[in-house]
Image (cartoon, coloured by chain):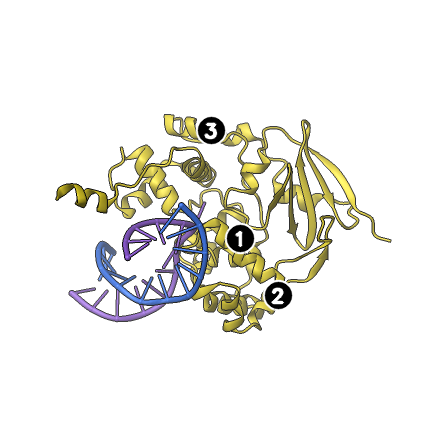
Chain colours: A yellow, B purple, C blue
Amino acid sequence: MSLPSRTLFSVREYDLAATLASGQAFRWRQSGDAWRAVVGGKWVQLRPMAEGIEAATASPCNDWVWLENYLQIQVEFQSVAALFPADEPMREAVRACRGLRLLRQAPWECLASFILSSTKQITQIQQIIENLCGKFGDKVKALDARGSDYSFPQPERLASASEAELRACKAGFRAPYLRETARRVASGEVDLRALAAMPVETARNQLLALPGVGRKIADCVLLFAYGFQEAFPLDVWVMKALRELYFQGRPAPIKTLQKFSASYFGPCGGYAQQYLFHYMRTKLPRRRPENARAGISLVV
DNA sequence: CCCCAGGCACATC
DNA sequence: GATGTGCATGGG
């Protein structure tokens, strides 16, 4: 007999929707006010409540530490926000995205997911990962209408897949990167668990040695899976945010933005970065791109 | 038709 | 060391 379990996490200032849909994790699906995903091989449903977050699993669970840790329930939002730079752009981003949190994800799933993320929109990343889980993951019991879902595939499983099979999941040119990285993790050539005890620069170098992993993806994994809060993933959205909010819209070169982000946002820069990312993507009015064609037609 | 997307590897200067 | 380009695929 295996019955579902339920619990309530007491937590304040936690915007569940913003957190689960902010491009740090890719498996969450919304159904009404509930959010569902497979975390650590377990199907789980979360629901925002006045007192905190209600969680339900499809299978019995009497120790919720794994989920508390994933959601970072113990983090006090105020103590995080207090470490942000005291400037107007950050104040505005915090006002607009209050309650946005960083998750603490499993390293392998996080690494594999972000290898698949390059030059893709978030909805497409979600689609690729869903394809991958359906094809290579293990079936797990779920409480939704479908009755089942799939775990994120282990590195061994992806290492033994063919490049063509991965491409069939729409992984595109990322397929060989994912496959080779999966092989190195499965073979023990790289020990993802060991990174947690390393200084951030050493851990980053371990990740940078993997195919398909550059500075941006390495920083995503350092921040979202290991909790190195000084890691500052610099992607196109964050670069847009920095140029717009800190460089008066000037076309500052990447090098300048790298230096600025490394020195200005401090030891919790990664958290600030997530606020800028979410703020830029969801709250700032969409600036209509100066269309070259329209410009040319006017010149005639 | 165009440009862009939570980039990276590789060639070239 | 800096800069340019190809890479799959889908959205707008």
Camera-nearest label, 1 or 3: 1
**Is residue A210 in view?**
no
Q: Judge if badges 1 and 3 mark residues of a common chain.
A: yes
**Dot 2 surroundings within 10 Å: few (below 14), some, or many (20 or more)?**
some
**Dot 1 surroundings within 10 Å: few (below 14), some, or many (20 or more)?**
many
- What chain does mark 3 sit on? A
Which kind of residue does numbered mark 1 sit on?
Gln
Q: Between residues A139 and A107, which one lies in front from this camera angle? A: A139
Which kind of residue does numbered mark 3 sit on?
Ala
Q: Which residue is mark 1?
A: A126
Give the mark nearer the N terminus: 2 vs 1.
1
- Name the residue located 38 percent from the left edge and 43 percent from the top edge: A237
Give the mark nearer the N terminus: 3 vs 2.
3
Q: Between residues A16 and A246, which one lies in front from this camera angle? A: A16
- Name the residue located 25 percent from the left edge and 42 percent from the top edge: A251
When the figure is inspected, residue A187 is found, relative to residue A208, above or below; the finding is: below
Q: How far apart, in angstroms, are the residues tagged by discs 1 and 3?
A: 25 Å
Q: Judge if badges 2 and 1 mark residues of a common chain.
A: yes
| Residue A195 image offset from top left, x and y in percent | 53, 55
| Residue A137 image offset from top left, x and y in percent | 64, 62
Give the mark nearer the N terminus: 1 vs 3.
3
Tag of residue A96:
3
For the C terminus of chain A, the quadrant is top left
Q: How far apart, in angstroms, are the residues tagged by discs 2 and 1?
A: 15 Å
Which kind of residue does numbered mark 2 sit on?
Phe
Q: Judge if badges 3 and 2 mark residues of a common chain.
A: yes
